[in-house]
């Protein structure tokens, strides 16, 4: 069951107009909160954004799908964002913060997928602008943006050919994500 959810959980970049409620977003964030944390410091803080105008204000400050020329339009833009922030009063070790954020973000996206939504984990966005738009205190560093909505695209996993993992879209705008084989990834068995 968990493997099916992992396969379903793709990076979606095009969304329908279906709104996400604060309650649904909080449910997703709760799954991030419950994940493992280095030294159990729990130094990640979250800003939950469902307001349509605020989502529209954030959208132009994001960058999408660096390997292809396609980008979502404003009509396809996310219907919610979870902004992951580091709390400087709780976290001094940046690598551990990113480790914790990876664990939390995966949990959030898995829960979103289970709820019928999809998302995309963004590191390519104007962090200073998002911090300004949301009026986030200096104590918190804006690190990761999780874009969320009801997926409006098809994403398919395919086997990588000769190590080429470059994702692409076909003429029908289906998004393909090549994955390396299990054999290629295992370097040792004993």
Image (cartoon, helix red, strand yellow):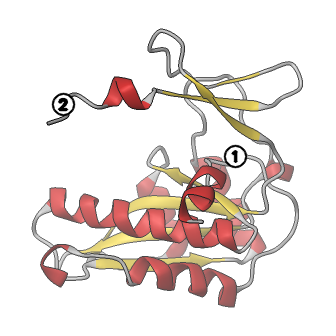
Residue most toward the top?
A: 162
Q: Which mark is residue 29?
A: none
Number of marks drawn: 2
Q: Check disc 2: other Cα within 10 Å, few if <14, some if 14-19, many if 20+.
A: few
Which quadrant is the C terminus positioned in? top left
Q: Nearer the viewer, mark 2 or mark 1?
A: 2
Q: Position of residue 141 (x, y in %)?
A: 31, 67
> In the picture, residue 49 is in which quadrant?
bottom right
Q: Check disc 1: other Cα within 10 Å, few if <14, some if 14-19, many if 20+.
A: many
Q: Position of residue 3 (x, y in %)?
A: 55, 57
Q: Disc 2, disc 1: CB below 8 Å?
A: no
The answer to whether residue 61 is above or below residue 57 is: above
Q: Earlier in the sequence, mark 2 or mark 1?
A: 1
* Residue at 39%, 83% in the rendered image: 33
Q: Position of residue 163 (x, y in %)?
A: 44, 14
The answer to whether residue 115 is above or below residue 94 is: below
Q: Which mark is residue 188?
A: 2
Relative horizontal placement of residue 151, taking residue 147 as reference (left or right): right
Residue 152 visible = yes
Residue most toward the front?
A: 190
Which quadrant is the N terminus positioned in? bottom right
Q: Position of residue 56 (x, y in %)?
A: 73, 61
* Residue at 63%, 80% in the rendered image: 25
SS at badge 1:
loop
Residue indicated by mark 1:
13
Relative horizontal placement of residue 143, taking residue 131 as reference (left or right): left
Residue 142 visible = no
* Residue at 69%, 46% in the rendered image: 13
* Residue at 41%, 32% in the rendered image: 182
156 and 149: which is toward the camera: 156
């Amino acid at each position: 069951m968990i493997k099916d959810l992992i396969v379903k959980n793709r990076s979606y970049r095009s969304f329908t107009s279906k709104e996400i409620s604060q309650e649904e977003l909080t449910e997703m964030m709760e799954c991030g909160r419950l994940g493992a944390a280095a030294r159990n410091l729990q130094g990640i803080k979250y800003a939950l954004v469902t307001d349509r105008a605020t989502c529209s204000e954030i959208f132009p400050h994001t960058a999408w799908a660096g390997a292809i020329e396609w980008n979502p339009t404003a009509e396809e833009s996310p219907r919610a964002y979870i902004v992951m922030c580091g709390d400087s009063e709780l976290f001094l070790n940046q690598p551990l913060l990113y480790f914790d954020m990876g664990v939390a973000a995966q949990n959030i996206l898995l829960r979103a997928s289970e709820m019928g939504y999809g998302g995309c984990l963004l590191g390519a966005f104007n962090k200073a602008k998002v911090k300004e738009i949301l009026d986030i205190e200096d104590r918190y560093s804006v690190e990761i943006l999780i874009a969320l909505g009801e997926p409006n695209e098809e994403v398919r996993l395919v086997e990588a050919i000769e190590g080429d993992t470059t994702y692409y879209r076909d003429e029908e705008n289906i998004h393909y994500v090549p994955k390396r084989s299990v054999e290629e990834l295992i370097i040792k068995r004993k």
